[in-house]
Image (spheres, grey):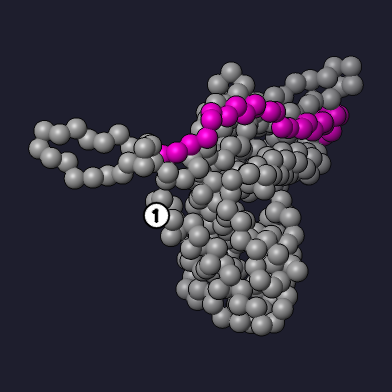
Amino acid sequence: MYPEEPLDPQYLENYLSNPTRVRRQIAENIKDRSIADYAFGQGNANQGAVVYDVITGEVLEGEREAEEIAPGASFPIITVNSSEPKLAKVDKYGGAAEMLWDAIRRNETDTWASRQRVLEGTVIKKVNRVSVKAIEDAPLKQVLTVGAGWSVGSTDVVSDILAGKSLIDDQELGYTANLALINPLDAQAYLLGRKDVREQFPKESRELNPVLSADIDGLANLEWIKTNRVPRGKMYIMQRGVFGSVRDELNGLQTNVYDNNDRQLKVVQAWRNIVPIITDPKALLEINGIGA
């Protein structure tokens, strides 16, 4: 949360003099807006890079599969087919906000709240953009091109979504699609804007994670996230936390607070050292052509 009146006349000075408090507050403010942390699995990155395998499908070594085991017999060695190990480099994404010493002394909490909001929004927007771009660029993900754009009145939008979902569910690879990402304008035009689709929305109310879209959540038995990070004309369906992960080198959001004595101001930096990777592209599907 951001400070509200009435306040200690030294609230802002005390707040910005406590780097741990600043980090915790910024992390708390952005946690429910992080597509990267909600959609992706989480993992660590060491020494600035990640070496990982991409599971390309259930093509088994030597065409072997589970089989009957005689008493005392050895079990067959079964491994999923994967690509050559890949290397992904961790990058740092962040920004900084400044506050004059005079403004801090005057306890201008509204000014700082505005600047902190901009800093938070910049960091979370960039992290989400990088993460969704990894989904968009995944070379082995499944792709479904709809027969007609969803602006056509006769198009069965829900059927297209279910067809995409089944391409993940019905592979017998253990995947279950449960999350969808879509651009807000496409959601408005092709889901909320169509009566035949609105009639398929769940009627019951339930607790939702704030990152999800409450107005369409549950359609086709999926959680939905509306985000401008997804380009218009396409959407993505996936199994949350399985298709890939965000590898974090420094265990979450980092901040730094320091004084610039030459300019008589305080600087707050916020950043994350991460790399998103796609490990199970068969648990990820792109539906394109929806805006045609």
Residue where numbered disc 1 is placed: 172
What segment carries the magenta color? 80-106
Q: Is residue 210 visible?
A: no
Q: Position of residue 214 (x, y in %)?
A: 58, 65
Placement of 211 over or under 70, stated as above or below: below
Residue at position x 75%, y 69% from top? 292
Label 1: which secondary element: loop
Residue situated in front as seen by the camera: 114 or 175: 175
Residue situated in front as seen by the camera: 136 or 212: 136
Q: Position of residue 160 (x, y in %)?
A: 58, 70
Q: Is residue 279 visible?
A: yes
Whether residue 78 is in magenta: the answer is no
Image quarter in which the N terminus is found? top right
Residue situated in front as seen by the camera: 6 or 152: 152
Q: Position of residue 250 (x, y in %)?
A: 58, 25
Whether residue 83 is in magenta: the answer is yes
Choose top left, top right, bottom left or bottom right for residue 144.
bottom right
